[in-house]
Image: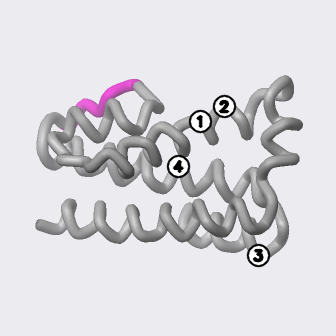
Amino acid sequence: MDFAAMENLLSNGHYVWALFVGRLVIEKLLKALYVKRVDPQVPRSHNLLAIAEKTGLELNAEQKLFMDEITGFNIRARYPDVKMRFFKKATHAFAEERLIRIKEFRKWLMAKIRS
C-alpha cells in the first residue's frame, strides 16, 4: 500500500510526501528483514543505515550514503523549520531520481527477505 501511495504522490506532484513515503517503504522492509534475521522485536529507530547494519546486510559505500540521505527525508518532510527548504529542493527530477533508487533498493531488499 505504501509503495502505491508513493507512486501516486509522485504522479500528483506531491514530491516531498512521495519521498517521505518512499523512505517508509524502505524502513518497513528493513524491519521485516530484521525480524527474519535477528529478532521479532524491531529496533525503535528510524535510522535506516543503523537498522540495515543490525540486520547484517553488507552495504557498499554508495548504498550507505543513500541510506543516510533517505533517512533525512523523515525529518525534512515532517518538521516545518526544514520542510520549506526541502520543498524547494524536492523538484520532480530530484524526487523521481531518488524514487527510482528507492524502487531498486526495495527490489533488492525483497529478494533478501525471500531468501
Query: Contact (CB < 8 A) between labels 1 and 3?
Result: no
The amino acid type, in three-letter code, at marker 2 is Ile
Residue under label 3: 11
Numbered circles on residues, count? 4
Image location of residue 95, percent across then percent down? 69, 61
Report, in whole angstroms, how far the alpha carbon at label 1 lies from the one at label 4: 11 Å
The answer to which of marks 1 and 4 sits earlier in the sequence is 4
Tag 2: Cα neighbours inside 10 Å, few (<14), some, or many (≥20)?
Answer: some
Image location of residue 62, percent across then percent down? 38, 50
The amino acid type, in three-letter code, at marker 4 is Leu
The answer to which of marks 2 and 3 sits earlier in the sequence is 3
Residue 81: in sight, yes or no?
yes
Magenta segment, principal secondary structure? loop
The amino acid type, in three-letter code, at marker 3 is Ser
Report, in whole angstroms, how far the alpha carbon at label 1 lies from the one at label 3: 22 Å
Q: Residue at x 23, y 50 (%)?
A: 33
Image side of residue 33 versus residue 29, left or right = left
Frontmost of labels 4 and 2 is 2
Residue 1: in sight, yes or no?
no
**Of residues 89 and 43, which is closer to you in this image?**
89
Residue under label 1: 72
Q: Residue at x 84, y 46 (%)?
A: 87
Residue under label 4: 24
Quarter location, residue 39: top left
